[in-house]
Amino acid sequence: MLNLIQVEFLKLRRKKIIWIMLLAALIMPFFALFFVDKGVDPREYYRWSAFNFTILIILPVILGILSTMLMHEENQYDTLKQLWIVPISKIGYFFSKFFVVLVYSICFMLIEFVASVMVSVLLGYVAFEWSSVLYLLQKCLEYGFFTAFVMLPILAIASSQKGYILPICITLVYVFFALFIWSVNMYIHPLTSMNVIVARNNDIPGIMWPQGINVPLAFLCIFVWDIIAVFFANMALKRSEV
């Protein structure tokens, strides 16, 4: 398993576009300057600069593209058939890809954290306070960690496809469906359930809870989706032997 993870990170050296995609973490810290006024509560500012659209749209879409890229070459050129001869555990192979997504997601949010603090403090939008900085760091780490698990179903779909188009289209549908389902039921989609978990203490301004906060149910939602995703990926990778 560790060898597979090491190989995955070595392969990333050849894909410069993956590192360029990290620049998307700078989008909302920049646009937050137009959404909020100077002197606002730090948590209100960070809601715009680090959470909000980053968590609901930008990061999930980036991770969906990353998942597709991680699976694309080996599926397209039937490299998997050669890997199974070794042999390599299919679940181990799948989770080595997932570990890359997890690390990437956390790194993305750490960049978001640094950019949000630097922009807000240097331009005088909020005063530098360790309590608010540590609050932002905690939330960014939590969002980075959980978003990777939320996007596990997309990685599973990418494992069954040889092309880019379908996984990326499903990523967009998956992400935007969460926006529409929010007011209906937050506990049937992993993205909305993740927000319940991270904002469980009602410490992120502006988040509405139409159905109230139920953290165990939110965890159950993500767990069920991920179990189904792992099962689907295992079946898809078995079919690639043929």
Image (cartoon, helix red, strand yellow):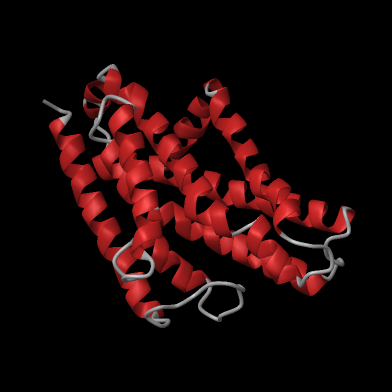
Q: Quadrant of residue 96?
A: top left
Above or below, 90 relative to 142: above
Q: Looking at this view, name the residue that lies furthest to the top.
A: 77
Residue 131: % across, % down: 77, 74
Residue 89: % across, % down: 26, 40
Q: Is residue 137 visible?
A: no
Above or below, 51 relative to 41: above
Residue 118 vs residue 39, the one in the foreground: 39
Q: Residue at x 18, y 38 (%)?
A: 236
The quarter of the rendered structure image containing the N terminus is: top left
Q: Residue at x 87, y 67 (%)?
A: 127
The quarter of the rendered structure image containing the C terminus is: top left
Residue 79: % across, % down: 28, 20
Answer left or right for 176 relative to 100.
Answer: left
Task: State how many labels appear.
Answer: 0
Residue 26: % across, % down: 68, 43
Above or below, 39 relative to 52: below
Answer left or right for 76 relative to 23.
Answer: left
Q: Is residue 5 visible?
A: yes
Q: Quadrant of residue 98?
A: top left
Q: Looking at this view, name the residue that lies furthest to the left.
A: 242
Q: Residue at x 87, y 53 (%)?
A: 123
